[in-house]
Image: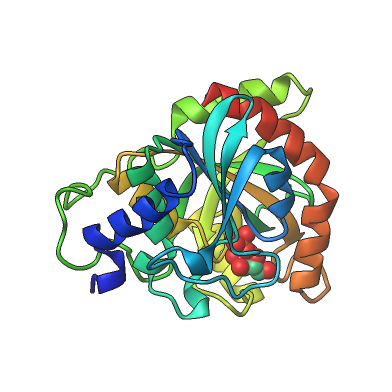
Amino acid sequence: MTTTNTNANSIREAADYIRSKTDIVPEIGLILGSGLGILANLIEDAVSIPYEDIPHFPVSTVEGHEGELLLGTIQGRPVVMMKGRFHMYEGYGPEVTAFPVRVMKNLGVSGLLVTNAAGGVNTSFKPGDLMLLTDHLNLTGKSPLIGPNDASLGVRFPDMSEAYSRRLRAAASEAASEHDFTFREGVYAGLLGPSYETPAEIRMLRALGADAVGMSTVSETIVARHAGIEVLGISCITNMAAGILDQPLSHEEVMETAEMVKEKFLSLVLSIIPKM
Ligand code: R1P
């Protein structure tokens, strides 16, 4: 059910607090995936606000998710960036994990770049690949929109036929070609976690049409679409999913691969933002 910390008043209180700390009116929101905190270096004249200071904000509990909101500019565009996101396996409901997206909307955001670390399900992928999300499978069994619908936040039955904006995907591909780079493209399956998937689950996901798998993103995207925000999603394929290689999975490997691709990711995001 909708809880007191995710209703319209709470969103306004969180946004008002953020506005009291900066004059930046962000147009673009960014959410950084596991190990991708380095993208925060892209922001000029950043104002940093710890999550614990923001009314109604949850706190980050996962390694690689620092827990600060940054506001500033990237290539002259005003942005708000979540350095650290929330996951359902931390014990938060989907509406709590996506609460910051509603706050971003209140601040003025119309485009969201959501990034994540994901396991490669498509066997033609390699660790270090970057994948544009063409769509997602919400396999968490939950929706952040459960409960009474507040019409001031969005419609009761939001359309999800273009969850990840075609226009923004084209813009990202164009930016990549300027770097002689080609994104992978595919479907992201969002699961609850926190255990990594079994080889049988990965075979199931592949049969369902998934190309990558992770434990985030889907709730954020659902709330963004509900709010009328255009979404661009990029997965960093940090490892091959279970059963593809004969080796166990670990969060250390996820963080190491994210570290390996950081320069590429930084330069791409720098080129993508002006086109959003
Ligand atoms: C597992 O290594 C963690 O990495 C991914 C998974 O969802 C999980 O949290 O993190 P992000 O999706 O936040 O990038």
The answer to whether any part of residue 69 appears in the image is yes
Q: How many discs appear?
A: 0
Residue 80 in the image, given as x and y percentages of width and height: 52, 43
Q: How is the image coloured?
A: rainbow
Nearest the camera: 276 or 59?
A: 59
Residue 98 in the image, given as x and y percentages of width and height: 40, 60
Please give left or right for residue 81 compared with residue 127 in the image: left
The image quarter containing residue 227 is: top left
Residue 157 in the image, given as x and y percentages of width and height: 19, 50
Q: Quadrant of the N terminus?
A: bottom left
The answer to whether any part of residue 191 appears in the image is no
**Residue placed at 21% from the left, 47% from the top?**
154
* Residue reaching furthest to the front: 20
In the image, is residue 25 above or below residue 199? Answer: above
Q: Quadrant of ligand 1?
A: bottom right
In the image, is residue 154 above or below residue 203? Answer: above
Nearest the camera: 138 or 83?
A: 83
Please give left or right for residue 118 compared with residue 221 in the image: right
Residue 56 in the image, given as x and y percentages of width and height: 38, 68
**Residue placed at 33% from the left, 40% from the top?**
161
Nearest the camera: 179 or 108?
A: 108
**Residue placed at 30% from the left, 65% from the top?**
6
